Amino acid sequence: MKYTAGIIGLGSCVPDRIMNNFDFEKIMDTSDEWIRTRTGIKERHIVSEGEANTDISIKAAKRAIEDAKIDPKDLDLIIVSTITPDTVLPPTSCLIQEMLGATNAAAFDISAACTGFIYALTIATQFIENGMYKNILVIGAEILSSITDYTDRTTSILFGDGAGAAILSRVDEGGILSTYIGADGSGKDYLFIPAGGSRLGTSVQTIEQNLHTVKMAGNEVFKFAVRKMEEASLEAIKKAGLKLEDVDFLIPHQANIRIINSSAKRLNMDMENVYINIDKYGNMSSASIPVALDEAYRKGKLKKGDNVLLVGFGGGLTWGSTMIKWNL
Ligand code: UT7
């Protein structure tokens, strides 16, 4: 028997501390004007000393569980998408499992950079559709400030911290119509962290050479993003048996307002129906889409029966999209 998966609860959380563009003016050669016009970002939330991934992802998770009106013991699986876990071992998903008392849930982390939430949603959808699991908590959570080089003006101004969570369950009406994921490892040098893995571990030299922070070829990623946002969107629409004009609402990854605008234009979407919060949070990698989805939902922008398209891209390079008939 094939079941249909749908989102039955959402939650999100960002740290309290705000770093605005003027704060960057004080530490590097940049300006509020440059950052706003080139990226659309005005401010981002950054953790305070001592705060880590699970300090915010647990709050997002609890909000989603409350919204779904389930008990943590009803969870069968927890998937956390992150490139900035509390620790490499144990997985952040296991820390969340213990914090929630979700004793019946299996737990694992996945790493697919900014597309991570779409990847995790795709995995969770399979488990629901094939009948193996009933309730799955999917989290996208990042503390990008922990891997950001605050001396590099081309990357540091982009990133923020945050967490978004969704409960996926069996639904009778609407739900996830299609998902699509892709990758191209030949783009590995466009967005990467040189050290900290098994290839180049942590040493005095790697720290002195600043090799534990994100390096990015911004222009290359930009061109790839504009192309892939359109391609991935069309793929999920086609797989759902829909047409472009059937899409009611678009929730894109929030990396740069110019990428969002040009993707929306290529997709012929009215900007009224495109959710944008990059001005407040910057790029939160795998947390961007679930935070935007939670906000759009709580603001009443998504109506029952709407065809809602999620689309993202990121390091790897990776990309993905999900078409949902909104069921809440
Ligand atoms: O989630 C996926 C991850 N990443 C992305 O999606 C990022 C995609 N790329 C981008 O968003 C853009 O490429 C950036 C925002 C990173 C850069 O914008 P750009 O319009 O592509 O600028 P650029 O790299 O071509 O640089 C233009 C100029 C350069 O100066 P010169 O060489 O023309 O004199 C940069 O040095 O802007 C300069 N610049 C800055 N100036 C002031 C770069 N960063 C800054 C800055 N403040 N923060």
Image (cartoon, helix red, strand yellow):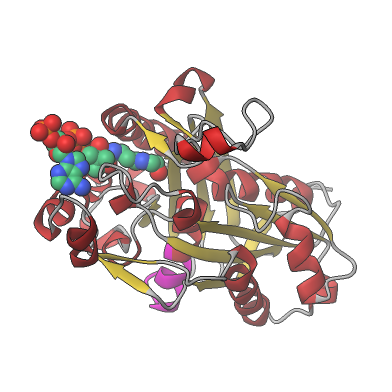
Q: Is residue 10 above or below residue 140?
A: below
Point 26% across, 63% down: residue = 279
Point 71% across, 58% down: residue = 92
Q: Position of residue 291 (x, y in %)?
A: 46, 65
Q: Main secondary structure of the magenta part?
A: helix
Q: Position of residue 91 (x, y in %)?
A: 75, 53
Ligand 1 located in image quadrant: top left
Q: Work out whether residue 94 or residue 241 is closer to the camera in this orientation and state it.
A: 94
Quadrant in which residue 173 is drawn: bottom right
Q: Is residue 304 above or below residue 116?
A: below
Q: How many marks?
A: 0
Does 26 sit left or right of 65 as displayed? left
Does 139 sit left or right of 147 as displayed? right
The residue sitting at the left extreme is 33
The residue sitting at the right extreme is 104
Answer whether residue 262 is visible to the viewer in this image. Answer: no
Q: Quadrant of the C terminus?
A: bottom right
Point 83% across, 76% down: residue = 101
Point 54% across, 29% down: residue = 182
Task: Tell me the magenta residue range.
Answer: 292-302
